[in-house]
Amino acid sequence: MVKKVVVTFTAGSAGRSLTYELIKKYDIMLSIIKADIDAGRNGKLVLELDADEDHIRQAIEYMENCGVEVSPLENKIKYDNTRCISCGACTSSCLSGALSIQAPDWKVVFDPDKCIVCRHCVTACPLKLFSTDFAG
Amino acid sequence: MAKTYEEINEKIRKGKAVVLTAEEVSEMARTMSPKEILGKVDVVTTATFGAMCSSGAFLNFGHANPPIRMERIELNGVPVSGGLAAVDTFVGATDCNVQNPTYGGAHVIEDLIAGKDVMLEAWGKGTECYPRKHIRTLISLKDINEAIMCNPRNAYQNYNVAVNTSDRLLHTYMGALLPNLRNASYSSAGELSPLLNDPECRTIGLGTRIFLCGAKGYVVWNGTQFNCSKPLNEHGVPMGNARTLALMGEMREMSTEFMRGAYFEKYGVTMYVGVGVPIPVLDEDMAARVSIRNSQIDTFIEDYGDGCKLIGQVNYEQLRSGEIEFMGRKIHTAPLSSLAKARQIADILKGWIQRGEFELTAPVRPMPTGTSLNGLEKRL
């Protein structure tokens, strides 16, 4: 299975090579989709973890034991779909295909599994319905 | 076989009028001739829900005691017109305070329609008859006098498709245009759009009763930039930005379901406006007009990355497929106006007419013919 998570770490927990451990210990095929690390070494990573379910679960437990916070990506992208008018403006610049609009009902659909946190939707939405924890 | 407005209205009053949406009639036209459609259908409902910057509202606040001649006015911090008598104003949809550019006149109008309190602050120089110089208070639609939406240019007949051939990201009123032709942005409701179903305005004129943001509103004039000179395609559809409508309606009957304040990044504030226009099927010609399909509606491709040059042509069926082939590339297409909302509006208007709650109006005056657009010449 493929799972996208947001890993939030503080200066204290960033000393280890987490990604190396994830690959070596848990046999995870790992892609870093986005990294947002400040000068004090606090930061966020968006990781795509590709492995069987057990290994992914163990890997997440391992990261949490290292003192980093792990959240599913969909919890980190906020989309207020109750106010959405389905104009489709967000889908125009969403090249990952996470946001789509099509026949028959022409309503905007958000698939967080495809999101790469490019943040184009945050600026593209005329009603400002998207927000993320990431810097622009 | 032709029908009059009065004959159609008589059927509406008896609950016997046959009403279809423009999409339904376009589907019907695949197997039926205009003559057969004329025999079966009385009214076709059209609609659009898009960003329309040339929109706004007239408000009358009522007089305070002692009274003030409001010469500078702000609503929720947004400067609005101080140029209309003592306590009238016009809130332009794109009015905004540069300190807070993402909230503007359209959002003030949305807040009022939502029933919220809005902060009114106004200043005057003080006169013999209007001695007060300043006032700061809350207003809402419950306590002011008139609140009339008045939109000088809505419901554009067709509109160019926006692309960007340059190598930098552009933020425009057509949305974010990615560099090197990565996306194309279109805004018309296609075969559901009002002025594409009556391209020469045979039935839409001054006094036409319509759906405006949930209210029963009216076409009050030809819209600004009303342009009859655009080239026609083989199906009689004007290509690119052509005719427009000026619309008015009572704000207290409106709903934020069908209007929204909006902000386009690095462009500014605009207003999403929901418009529905009923079109009577008077004769075979009108039956043929309302049968128009997306594949028959062409528009130009405009390059916002290179001086707004027209660089191609495409139809709405191709645009709706999600991808067009252009200049040897596959380009992702996306709408800017809500087809889902436009369909909802066309259905509501259909229901009003079927239930006898909404009769059709013949134009008091037809729309102009032979108009074209002037540019602004710099004479100094």
Image: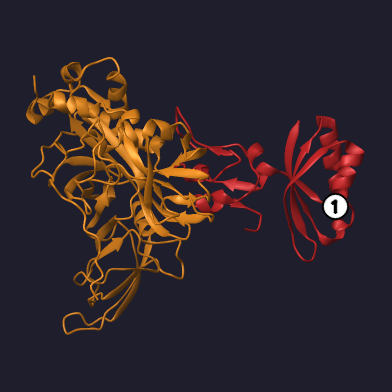
Percent from the top left, x then y, of residue B9?
12, 29
Compared across the picture, whether B47 is left or right of B178 comes to left
Residue at image position (27%, 34%) is: B46
- For disc 1, the chain is A
Q: Amino acid at mark 1?
A: Gly
Disc 1: which residue:
A67
Q: Is residue B153 visible?
A: yes
**Left or right, B280 with reference to A56:** left
* B250 vs B239: above or below: below
Disc 1 packing (10 Å; few <14; some 14–19; many ≥20):
some
Residue nearest the observer in this picture, B136 or B258: B258
Image quadrant in which the N terminus of chain A is located: top right
Q: Quadrant of residue B64?
A: bottom left
- Residue B192 percent location from the top left of the image: 31, 33
A111 on left or right of B28 = right
Name chain A's colour. red
In the image, B181 versus B98, the foreground residue is B181
Q: Position of residue B67 (x, y in %)?
A: 22, 76
What SS does tag 1 mark? loop
